[in-house]
Amino acid sequence: MQTSDLNRYLDRLLDTGRIKDYCPNGLQVEGRSEIKKLVGGVTASQAFLDAALDSGADAVLVHHGYFWKGEAEVITGIKKRRLQSLLVNDLNLFAYHLPLDVHSEFGNNIQLAKLLGFDVVGGLEPNNPKSVGLYGQLKTPMTVVELNAEITRTLGRESMFIADPKKVISTIAWCTGAAQGMIDKAIDLGVDAYLSGEISEPTVHIAREAEIAYFSAGHHATERYGVQALGLHIAEQFGVEFEFIDIDNPV
């Protein structure tokens, strides 16, 4: 597979040109022209890059890449070492942030719904066709404690909740990663619960006062599945090898 072909294919598939984001999406660092092995991960950390190189990767595909708005423009320290690993080893870096969150088939949010058994009803932002989050129903209503245990078991990370443990959850909204600030949109929808990756101090008070159950399931833990689904799709479409490398992250 040619690097340029994959770049064009993913730009079309994920509709990157129509999504406003905090970073560039697509081929962030160009490496060798031919890709035989693609390695996926959540974040292009140094540990991930080292593991990808050890596995013989020609390209890496991640959700959290580089060049975020507001970050320092100089290439020193951690940024220098990461970019050096890519450039010296001629390793391609593909990164898709919001386009991978919102995609209707390979996105983090739809993949999390499939994993947790949520039936999707619509977008967390009903008037936005590119809504980042989703809302829907549980196949079987559960108490807060039961649902939290199911999230913990499925994601392999201890989930926490803010709610009456005995409250029964039938409807839920969710948005992976650092989307705790979107709890207001879940409240507007009138759902029983909202799930995201992270939690902030104000989230606790909002959840209590609005009487909506809040689940914090982990930023990394909720965003492992879009890259995996997309990587397997690429492997099937182009006949390349794909491997997902999960670098442990408790957050």
Image (spheres, helix red, strand yellow):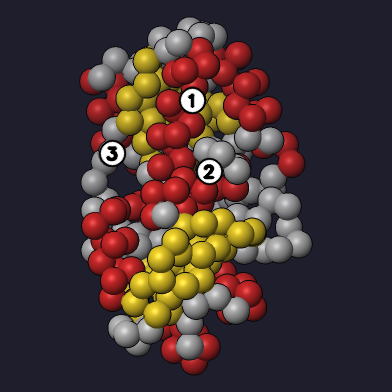
Disc 1 versus disc 3: nearer the observer:
1
Q: Is residue 220 left or right of residue 101?
A: left
Tell me the tag on residue 246: 3
Three-letter residue code for mark 3: Asp
Q: Earlier in the sequence, mark 3 or mark 2?
A: 2
Question: Badge 2, how many Cα within 10 Å: few under 14, some, many 20+?
Answer: many
Question: Badge 3, how many Cα within 10 Å: few under 14, some, many 20+?
Answer: some
Disc 3 versus disc 2: nearer the observer:
2
Tell me the tag on residue 10: none
Q: Residue at x 58, y 31 (%)?
A: 26
Q: Earlier in the sequence, mark 1 or mark 2?
A: 2
Question: Badge 1, how many Cα within 10 Å: few under 14, some, many 20+?
Answer: some
Question: Which residue is identified by label 1?
Answer: 233
Q: Secondary structure at mark 3?
A: loop
Q: Residue at x 41, y 71 (%)?
A: 141
Q: Residue at x 28, y 75 (%)?
A: 145
Report how far apart the C-alphas of labels 3 and 2 lie in the structure. Answer: 17 Å
Task: Give coordinates of residue 46: x percent, y percent.
Answer: 30, 36
Question: Which residue is identified by label 2?
Answer: 107
Q: Is residue 101 left or right of residue 143?
A: right
Three-letter residue code for mark 1: His
